[in-house]
Image (cartoon, grey):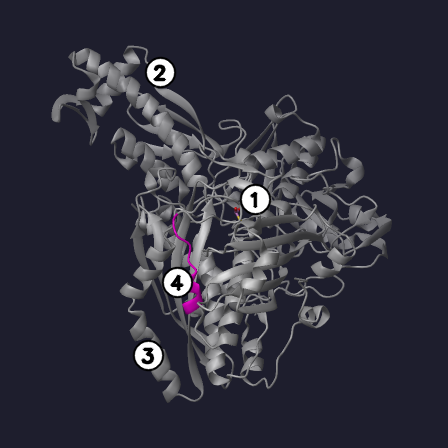
Amino acid sequence: MKNIDSRTHIRGESIYLDDIPLLQGTLFGAAFGSPMAHGVITNLDVEDAVRIPGVVQIFTYKDITGINQIGGIIPDEPLFADEHVHFCGMPIAFVVAETDEAARSAVKKIKVDIDPLPVITDPRVAQEKGELIVAPRSFVLGDVDKAWQDCAYVFEGVAETNGQEHLYIETQGAYAIPKESNGIKIYSSTQSPRATQQASCKVTGLLMHQLEVEVIRLGGAFGGKEDQANAWAAMCALSTHVLRRPVKYSLHRIEDMAMTGKRHPYSSDFKIGLNKDLKIIAYETIFYQNAGAAADLSPAVLERTLFHCTNSYFIPHVKAKAYSCRTHLPPNTAFRGFGGPQGMFVIEAAIAKAAECLGVEASVIQKKNLNKTGDEFPYGQKAVSEARECWEKTELVYDVTALKKEVATFNAQNKLYKKGLSFMPVCFGISFTNTMMNQARALVHVFTDGSVSVTTGAIEMGQGVNTKILQVVATVFSISPENVKVQTTSTHKIANTSPSAASATADLNGKATLMACNAIKERLIMVVAEALNVDITAIELKDERVCVNGEQCDWDWKRLVMAAFLKRVNLSEHAHYATPEIHFDKLREKGHPFAYHVYGTAITIVTVDCLRGIYEFDAVKVVHDFGATMNPAIDCGQIEGGIVQGMGWMTMEELIYDKEGKLRSNTLSNYKVPDIYSVPKVIAIDFLQTENDNLAIFRSKAVGEPPLMYGIGAYFALRNAIKSFNPAALIPYSAPMTPEKVLLALYQKKEVTTTHEQAAGHMAIPS
Ligand code: MOS
């Protein structure tokens, strides 16, 4: 089934925040952000700004009617700076005016004096100074300290990944509307209506029943609207609460890029030990996460880095430690993969280093160490593994022997063009790592004309979750998709939602929908069984008909619904689903946090122009563990998008903050994201259909985040291509691998070290 939004998308009829018709009297807001990353405000001058015609009011922390706090996990994030500023772009004031132009002109007239304080942008510096968001976390398996002596080879190094701008096509925004009796309704571009409702209530002082958040759909989010949609909604809510007029704020791209957090940059140390047979015996790593100026979701992201620190491999002795480091960058946040990709890059770098030093292909070490069913992850859960099946199927369906030969032949025949090939296995855990968040609700109404409405906590952000929800309803009742409507997401219809995140939205909300539909279906079957005087087990609903013992009878779906209504049978249901079997003990750092894992293997092939350092990706070929996909079109779309987004992070998206904490890659002209020309010429997707996982909706495994990590293969394919041109190149394990860095590596004569390798003397982990 096609994505149900495709028709309105193509015709430009889909409604996003900016398409909502404005109510008469709507005002427009714009935020004034700090021009400095760290300091004390000595004077805020809004005199000239207030004089701009049309300006209604300029809000600062002094005007807050509730509390000046929007921190989600930790209350460490004021909505507006009071005396201190902690990052460039930190909101200081919010101008509300009759027009958008007036609001933005006024923002330009605001003047602020700030006494500067020292700025930290490097997570290792922050860690040295004790600037941590939370206490460090450690995952331990076996006894790594003892295990080194059993290793024939031990390698150490530093691996670094940069941040990533979300670049959702629809920028952040909110539109607040006053309702009677002090109520407010907010339309928001948020992944988490509950979090947006809660933050807006804290700031205004309203109770949650007075403030509704409704979401139609988002033009992309990728994690960037999991927590960071809240500030703008709270600003609009506050001004609506005070002025009793509708207030809208829709951020310009440049504001959005400057004021919001990104994917967390990480700098990490690794040490890996292997035996003579290239089995990895021991692995130790320290992660330094650049959290930015406030916690936001950083502690949870940090946790997922630890969960994925061994990727698809079984390693008997592991010690992984993670620091969430407070710097003066905008608070970094969720981004597709949620810390997992950062953790996986480090183990892949460690394996690449071992392979390069031992003169073997990385794939030899990778394949030897893939986990098997029953192997223990460092956090205690036992694998139900498809890692080997995926890898072996990849070798088979894409004829890896032939591919390798092609690459070798090409490299032998070409001097100034070289190809590189890499393998990237992925193992990603599905569930929120915070067990409490794994719950969802659905509200299903069957109307007397036989049409069905379903409302869940799921946010449609382009990923196709509404299509999957609709499929659940249509399947259970066996009715045509035209008879089902997925309604907008609202806190007043479905309360206490978890964000649409962690790849788990279709599973959680789909399961709740399944429960609600099944409950109604049971009641309907009872009605017809009674009327026809047959056993309920004889009744089946099929293609909008009622079947008795497999034979169509003269009852159709509509007659059934009407009969139930006349008998005063409840045609509505609100169901609640909580993922069973999962638990995690944070004190011991052990448990069973994931409903299941998604596996996959990607082969990436790149061609590097060794004169210019530029490159093109020939192909990414994937075998992906879909479970039993309920929608191949949507799932393949997620895989293609995830791969390209992951490749962008690894190759071209170069986020740059200067030493003063100012974003230099602040527009789309100096921050390059993949376009149609950077998409690999071939993306091949092969299905590993596995039927094990009943915790996935209809056994169709979650697909949102896992494919992003196939993109990591792009970095290692480039590395291999460079090596075949310049075998002596010792390239730092540092992404993104931009064309500039490729060019440097192609002609580099001796080892280029990262700043951190120099600082740490390359031996950062004491053994
Ligand atoms: Mo997603 S990165 O779990 O919002």
Residue at which label 2 appears: 570
| Labels 2 & 3 near each other (Cβ < 8 A) | no
Quadrant (top left/top right/bottom left/bottom right) for the C terminus = bottom right
Separation of disc 4 and disc 3 at Cα?
Answer: 17 Å
Which of the marked residues, 3 or 1, is nearer the chain's N terminus? 1
**Disc 3 residue crowd, few under 14, some 14–19, many 20+, Cα 10 Å:** few
Nearer the N terminus, badge 1 or badge 2? 1
- For disc 4, the neighbor class at 10 Å (few under 14, some 14 to 19, many from 20) is many
Which residue sits furthest left?
Answer: 551
What distance separates the C-alpha of mark 3 from that of mark 1? 44 Å
Is residue 291 found inside the magenta-colored segment of the image? no
Residue 657 in the image, given as x and y percentages of width and height: 69, 64
Residue plotted at (59% across, 47% down): 303
Q: Which of marks 2 and 3 is nearer the N terminus?
A: 3
Which residue matches tag 3?
Answer: 406
For numbered disc 1, what is the local secondary structure? Answer: loop
Distance of label 2 from label 3 (alpha carbons): 65 Å
Q: Which tag is nearer the camera, tag 3 or tag 1?
A: 3
Picture layout, residue 252 above or below residue 556: below
Q: Does the residue labelled 1 lie within 8 Å of ligand 1?
A: yes
Q: Are marks 4 and 2 in contact (CB under 8 Å)?
A: no
Residue 602, label in figure:
4
Disc nearer the start of the sequence (4/2) = 2
In front: label 4 or label 2: 4
Estimate how packed mark 2 is, as few (under 14), some (14 to 19) or many (20 or more) residues with alpha carbons within 10 Å.
Answer: some
Residue nearest the viewer, comparing 4 with 764:
764
Q: What residue type is labelled 4?
A: Ala
Separation (CA) of disc 4 from disc 1: 28 Å
Along the horizontal axis of the image, is 261 left or right of 433?
Answer: right
